[in-house]
Amino acid sequence: MKEIKVIMYHYIRPIKNGKFKGLKGLEVKEFDNQIKFLNENYNIINYDDFCSKLLNNNIQGDEVLLTFDDGYIDHYSYAFPILKKYNVSGVFFVNSLPDENVVMDVNKIQLIFGYYDYDMTKIKSVFLKEFSDIDSNFDTNNILELKKKWYLPNKFDNANIIFWKRLLQVGLKKEIRNLALKNVFNEIFGDEKDVAKDFYLNIKHIKEMYSNGMSFGLHTHSHVFLGELKDISNIKDEIVKNINYLNEYINMNYLSINYPYGNYDSNVLDVAKSLGIKIGFTTEWGG
Ligand SMILES: [Zn+2]
């Protein structure tokens, strides 16, 4: 069976000389080289063509779809000009929470871990202190219990790093992990509102990119593990808020979702289908 290659980008910015230490991403020049190469050797298709080829089973085999995740300002400042230079397009999966001047937990974790150079001994002690400050009865056995489920390496990070990311993304009680992340983040980087303003696409960027041929898709309201939400109404809420946010400004011919962390289950699929979502992407690994 012929396939369309889907390439997923996250951070594209000056990494080595960048503002945030230890951020894992692609240098701008490297991105330019990749797009040049792909443009010379493959057929970079736009999102509407991707959908119609897929739905009509009309795939040649040399097609590539460029996708961009999490709605970073990088996608406007660095990726968009390069895509225009080569006259190609991509699809951008954005969350709606950053519009409220909030740094999403997934990003707080990346920035904090990068700040500490992924020194897990240090990171662990910072957060254990934070957990017990927040809740004097905090029981570290909670953490050991969660190890069974979340202590798994992926192709980007070792098991210990993934485990601590998962604890803070989804594993621990929401009130505790949210507050711990907020406190540690503010301590290092200052008010998250100021960081959020320069970190994500805003609606002005989205409109300009859209009117220049770029496409947009859903990535949930707040970048959650949809498959871990037990309540259907919470799944629905995460997706509907995201749809409403984009629908207000742009027209999506084919509604698609990229599941954060590639995480979904049969309930999530049912909800997505009931909301008219035609295509789901599960390509994201790291977070
Ligand atoms: Zn994502």
Image: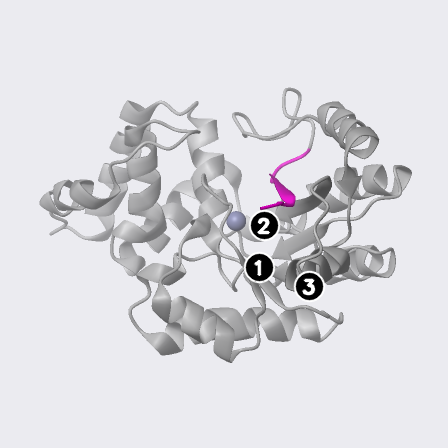
The secondary element bearing badge 1 is classed as loop
In this picture, residue 98 sits left or right of residue 29: left
Mark 1 CB near ligand 1 (8 Å cut):
yes
- Provide residue 276's location: percent of width, then percent of height: 57, 76
Q: Which residue is mark 1?
A: 95
In this picture, residue 196 sits left or right of residue 234: right
Mark 2 CB near ligand 1 (8 Å cut):
yes
In depth, the one of 161 and 214 nearer the eye is 214
For the rendered model, the colour scheme is: one colour
Circles 2 and 3: CB atoms closer than 8 Å: no
Tell me, for residue 56, which label it has, or none.
3
Residue located 68% across and 25% down the image: 27
Which residue is outermost to the top?
A: 16
Tell me, for residue 70, which label it has, or none.
2
Q: Which residues are magenta?
A: 1-12
Q: Of circles 2 and 3, which is in front?
A: 3
The secondary element bearing badge 2 is classed as loop
Q: Amino acid at mark 3?
A: Asn
